[in-house]
Amino acid sequence: MSFKGFIDTTFRDGQQSPLMFDSYKYRLTLENKKNLIYGLIRLGVRNFEFFAPNVSKSEAQDFIEIKDYVASLKIPGIRFLAHCRCHPNDIKEAIKAGFDGLNLYIGMTEFAQRFSHGMNMKEIIINVKKIIQATRKFYPRLYLRFSAEDSFRTPLNNIFRMYNEIHEFVDTLGIPDTVGIATPETVAERIKAFKIRYPKVDIECHFHNDRGLSLINALKAIETGASYIDTSIWGMAERSGITSITALLLNLYYENKSLCKDYDLRICYPLNVLMGSILKLQVSPAEPVSITNRTHTAGVHQKAVLNNPYVYEAHNLKIFGVEKNQLLLGPLSGKNLIYYYLREIEYYDLTLDQAAKISQEFKSKSGEMNKKNKPEVILKKIVGRYNLPKLSIKKEFLKNRVENLD
């Protein structure tokens, strides 16, 4: 495999996510960015993509502050990349700001030619080649990546016409699925074609999740020979997002552990929780590295998990920093959870037969459960009629409990 790692785009594509508006956050503060990049560095990420400085003064200033902050950490191998149009002004400002490399791009689809920049294929090739050759000439050590935006809707022969002209001047060629139409089959086909045609150049992939395929496409890309995959925390990006770095790491761990050797997997869940605290949102239920993935509501599941979590938890999420699981008291809970909850949480002395009777009555009240009339309140009223004695437990034993009861 040719996999070299992730290029994080939380601070670029991540800030374009609808979640930034849904949470009324709009943009990450400098303090947010410092905390997130520290977490990503601790995880093991070394490549970070930011907006070109001319996007806004605030983003430009934040980058300078972050660059100085990361330098103070004295961690080798960090590389900052500016996401730039193939435009001299973007390139000039990025180099002036001190970026280590440029992620250059331009659209080459029929749609981009007609409705975006207005150039035809011949004009695109002439302009891009001129800009990249000049940049390489004057900045020979600058890392350069070039991508044909919306690569999976761009005819392969057009991409080859462009890449044939510039591949010897760049470090990496990008194959971005900008609108999320790729499938694992088309990903494998294109990467194989690129590997044959440009064997000395790295390949970078950027998969959007419009079809819900970004994760499986990323796995297929790595399997087929991609050097880099663009990711973000929670998979945050335009529209439905891109590949989640923690979801990808979890899958890589189970597919090929050697690809995870440079990453501290225990940081995955804390990193997801950190983003949640910034956005004031729970970690998405669709995110594999989450407490949701260790949460159980059905009575059959709860009974089994009380005896051994691995009955319904096939993946050891403790490896990725998820230390706890949740058993939710609700209308599907059976006698086993009722017994556990009343005995271990509320300290009632009761038998399993009593718990069975209480659970039947509790389930009959399921239609009354809502935000104001919570399950535990309903259960407490039912239990009150049974006159159950309380267990006497010494304080020193309570200190040793592992449940999060807050």
Image: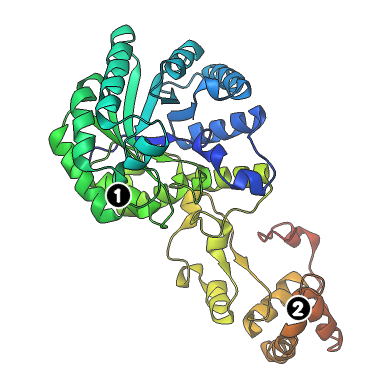
The image shows residue 163 at horizontal and vertical percentages of 22, 29
Find disc 1 in the rendering and name its residue: 256
First in sequence, mark 2 or 1: give its number: 1
Q: Is residue 273 visible?
A: no
Q: Nearer the viewer, residue 391 or 46?
A: 46
Q: Residue at x 53, y 19 (%)?
A: 67
Q: Quadrant of residue 377?
A: bottom right
Q: Residue at x 59, y 81 (%)?
A: 299
Report the amino acid beneath label 1.
Asn
Give the label, 2 or 1, closer to the camera: 2
Disc number placed over residue 369 in the picture, else none: 2
Q: Quadrant of residue 347?
A: bottom right
Q: Nearer the viewer, residue 12 or 311?
A: 12
The image shows residue 27 at horizontal and vertical percentages of 63, 35
Whether residue 257 sits left or right of residue 336 in the image: it is left
Report the amino acid beneath label 2.
Met
